[in-house]
Image (cartoon, rainbow, N blue to C red):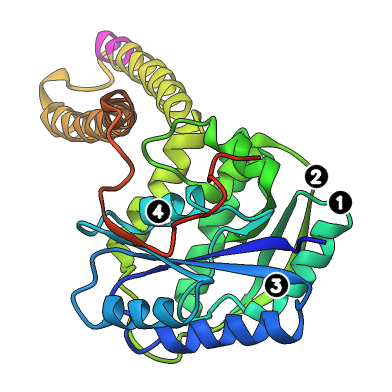
Amino acid sequence: MQKKVISIITPCYNEELSIVGCYETIRDLFATSLPNYELEHIFCDNASTDQTVPMLKELAARDPHVKIIVNSRNFGILKNTYNGVLAATGDAILLFMPVDLQDPPELIPTFVKHWESGYEIVYGIRGKREEPLALVAARKAYYRLLSRLTYVDYPPNVGDFQLVDRKVLDAMRRIEDAQPFMRLMTFDVGFRSIGVEYTWRARKQGKSANNLVHMFDQGLNGIISFSGAPMRAALLSGIIISFLSVAYAIGVFILALAGMIDSQHGIPTVIVALFFFGGVQLFFIGILGEYILAIYNQVRRRPLVIERERVNFDHERRADQP
């Protein structure tokens, strides 16, 4: 009987300190805890400038279960990871296994057990985080906001650490999104799901290339892609502010006619009002601009990434085969 294939997707960029440890951990896990499954470990390299790629090629030369996609340049972690997911041929796919193992690989057997019991989406819930309290609070606030704003039934504190069935990936392929946000795409397509809570661990070595600027961009992308709430908030705020402005103008006019205020001394009020409404308009124009940019990126239909090469992808089941 042919073994079922579990695909593991690991994006990387300048991770020479962590590559071997990640590979060995996943390899040993399958050898001991998942011996009845075949491993497909896809490393997606975002044009690393250190020894990451040579080290990966050395691993791939020894182990055919290791597959490599090397991009022509750095396309960002979201596109890089999703491109690797689309290349997966497994019966089930772990969408994201960080090379630094901050999401615990020892949960994979639990994920597989839930998958075999009939759940098409098994997602990890980051109940605790080993990081500074300020960053923990900011992340939790964002996830709660995203969960409330999006039209998708999305549980808070869930990242890309998810095991999905092949049918889920086939459904995700039908979503033509220029800025893929996987953690919500899985819930957008539906299917049965279950969560497993865990502790997100601190990075032990190396430095993450995903800085605050990148995280802000990714977070904004998630809200823009799966929620119309910002535009509706802008519309509602505009209506409220317009109503208050008219009410204020009528009130000032009545008080001026009654001689209760000196209409010639309203210059500070006018200046404050100009700055206030100018700031509000710029803010809402910025929101509108984000949606226009998302539309612009979508209609250009550019490829997710440009690949330099692939390693160990010969003589395999086609990625689009169900």
The amino acid at mark 4 is Leu
Magenta range: 253-258
Q: Which residue is mark 2?
A: 192
Q: Secondary structure at mark 1?
A: loop
Foreground mark, 2 or 1, reads 1
Task: Answer with mark 1 or mark 3, whichever residue precedes in sequence.
Answer: 3
Q: Is residue 255 magenta?
A: yes
How far is mark 1 from mark 4, CA to CA?
Answer: 28 Å
C-alpha span from label 2 to label 3: 18 Å
Secondary structure of residue under mark 4: helix
For badge 1, the amino acid type reads Gly
**Badge 1 is on which residue?**
118
Q: Residues within 10 Å of mark 3 (few under 14, many from 20)?
A: many
Q: Position of residue 279 (x, y in %)?
A: 22, 36
- Estimate the spatial distance between the alpha carbons at disc 4 and disc 2, rounded to whole Å: 24 Å
Asked if the residue at tag 1 contacts the one at tag 2, i.e. Cβ–Cβ closer than 8 Å, the answer is: yes
Q: Earlier in the sequence, mark 1 or mark 4?
A: 4
Q: Nearer the viewer, mark 3 or mark 4?
A: 3
N-term-proximal mark, 2 vs 1: 1
Q: CA distance from mark 2 to mark 1?
A: 8 Å
Q: Which residue is mark 4?
A: 78
Judge whether 215 appears above or below 108 on screen: above
Q: Position of residue 25 (x, y in %)?
A: 58, 86
Q: Quadrant of the C terminus?
A: top right
From the viewer's perspective, tell me whether residue 22 is left or right of residue 38: left
Q: CA distance from mark 1 to mark 3?
A: 16 Å
Tell me the chief SS of the magenta region: helix
Judging by the rendered image, the residue that carries numbered circle 3 is: 108
Q: Which residue appears at 84% of the width and 58% of the height?
A: 116
